[in-house]
Image (cartoon, coloured by chain):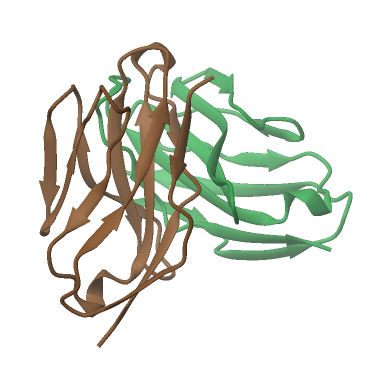
Amino acid sequence: DAEITQSPRHKITETGRQVTLACHQTWNHNNMFWYRQDLGHGLRLIHYSYGVQDTNKGEVSDGYSVSRSNTEDLPLTLESAASSQTSVYFCASSETANSYNEQFFGPGTRLTVL
Amino acid sequence: GDSVTQMEGPVTLSEEAFLTINCTYTATGYPSLFWYVQYPGEGLQLLLKATKADDKGSNKGFEATYRKETTSFHLEKGSVQVSDSAVYFCALSDIQGAQKLVFGQGTRLTINP
């Protein structure tokens, strides 16, 4: 079965370190998204991609970067981790960019920055 | 910009009670509206959706009607079960935003037997 996976599921790091969160989907979807989930804010969009070599900034992109070198993967990098980036991170994918299409979510990565 | 407002939680109900979770939105265009559900320890999954005014989305006994006149998309279920305990998110996707989802803050629902 097609799926979307994230790794690691849990990560503890220190302030200032670079961290990369992996997202891999086997749906062959063109669109991929990264969100962060914080209490009282729901999910907020960090970055998104509509295809290979395409990346776009979302609502809360400062301090994060992504790259899309193939269809299956969209890794999220925190250049210099800060305590404010402690959160749960979700990756999602969808087949087309139509507004009514469902997004499929991964299980999430819980990141703690000490 | 676009925004979604959900009723404050947490919500605690007894099994077989009637459920309503309120959701209102602000959007410049004609958004598609969604309810996503997050069970403990899992990612979000689509519960139901509606893509135009007066559409009713339904799934697993849950329903929500797209009300353009009141900019609302309230989630309802006639008789909840313990297995419905989860966090529920209302979201919109504006056609101008090319499928970027805007989420409400989420409502945690607990059903007691």
- So how many labels did they put on this image? 0
Question: Looking at the image, is B100 positioned above or below residue B58?
Answer: above
Q: Position of residue B20 (x, y in %)?
A: 27, 56
Q: Position of residue A3 (x, y in %)?
A: 30, 51
What color does chain A have in the rendering? Answer: green
Q: Which image quadrant: the C terminus of chain B?
A: bottom left
Q: Is residue B14 left or right of residue A68?
A: left
Q: Position of residue B83 (x, y in %)?
A: 24, 75
Query: Does residue A27 appear anywhere in the picture?
Result: no
Q: Is residue A34 left or right of residue B78?
A: right
Q: Quadrant of residue A31?
A: top left
Work out whether residue B11 or residue A63 is closer to the camera in this orientation and state it: B11
Residue at left offset 43%, top offset 51%:
B7
Q: Position of residue B106 (x, y in %)?
A: 45, 53
Query: Does residue B68 appear anywhere in the picture?
Result: yes
Residue at left offset 85%, top offset 60%:
A14
* Residue furthest out toward the bottom: B113
Q: Is residue A61 left or right of residue B60?
A: right
Question: Looking at the image, is A51 positioned above or below residue A72?
Answer: above
* Residue furthest out toward the right: A16
Q: Which image quadrant: the N terminus of chain B?
A: top right
Q: Quadrant of residue B31?
A: top left
Q: Quadrant of residue A61?
A: top right
Residue at left offset 37%, top offset 20%:
B94
Question: Looking at the image, is A31 positioned above or below residue A109?
Answer: above
Q: Is residue B13 left or right of residue A112?
A: left
Residue at left offset 61%, top offset 28%:
A59
* Residue furthest out toward the front: B70
Q: Which chain is brown?
A: B
